[in-house]
């Protein structure tokens, strides 16, 4: 996972269901800093971590069997 990174956002507070965005930062105060394109213009969004789900658009690279990744 790289930040900034392309993500899909799910957040009932803003009725987002798979909305494309760019994750810019994860703030220690408990929110995600995102950039979303709306009507051709980029807008900053700050969504609470507790009410937001997301996944990165790019899949993790395939690893060889028997190879361990330390996280």
Image (cartoon, rainbow, N blue to C red):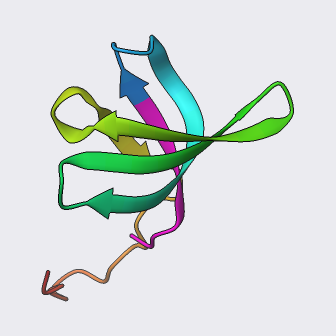
Q: Is residue 71 above or below residue 60?
A: below
Residue 27 percent coordinates (x, y): 27, 59
Task: Report how many numbered discs are placed on residues in the image.
Answer: 0
- 13 vs 2, nearest the viewer: 13
Q: Is residue 6 above or below residue 21?
A: below
Give the extent of the magenta segment. Answer: 1-9
Q: Is residue 4 magenta?
A: yes
- 71 vs 24, nearest the viewer: 24
- 59 vs 50, nearest the viewer: 50
Looking at the image, which residue is at 19% across and 89% down?
Answer: 67
Q: Is residue 10 magenta?
A: no
Q: Is residue 71 above or below residue 48?
A: below
Looking at the image, which residue is at 45% across and 10% down?
Answer: 15
Residue 2 percent coordinates (x, y): 44, 73
Q: Quadrant of the N terminus?
A: bottom left
Looking at the image, which residue is at 60% across and 36% down?
Answer: 20
Q: Quadrant of the C terminus?
A: bottom left
Residue 51 percent coordinates (x, y): 22, 26
Looking at the image, which residue is at 45% across and 70% down?
Answer: 3
Residue occupying the far right of the picture: 40
Residue 50 percent coordinates (x, y): 15, 33
Residue occupying the far front of the picture: 29
């Amino acid at each position: 996972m790289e930040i900034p990174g392309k993500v899909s956002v799910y957040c009932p507070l803003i009725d987002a269901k798979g909305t494309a965005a760019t994750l810019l930062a994860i703030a220690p105060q408990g929110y995600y800093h995102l950039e979303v394109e709306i009507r051709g213009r980029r807008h900053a969004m700050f969504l609470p971590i507790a009410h937001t789900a997301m996944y990165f658009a790019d899949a993790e690279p395939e690893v060889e069997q028997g190879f361990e990744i330390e996280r």
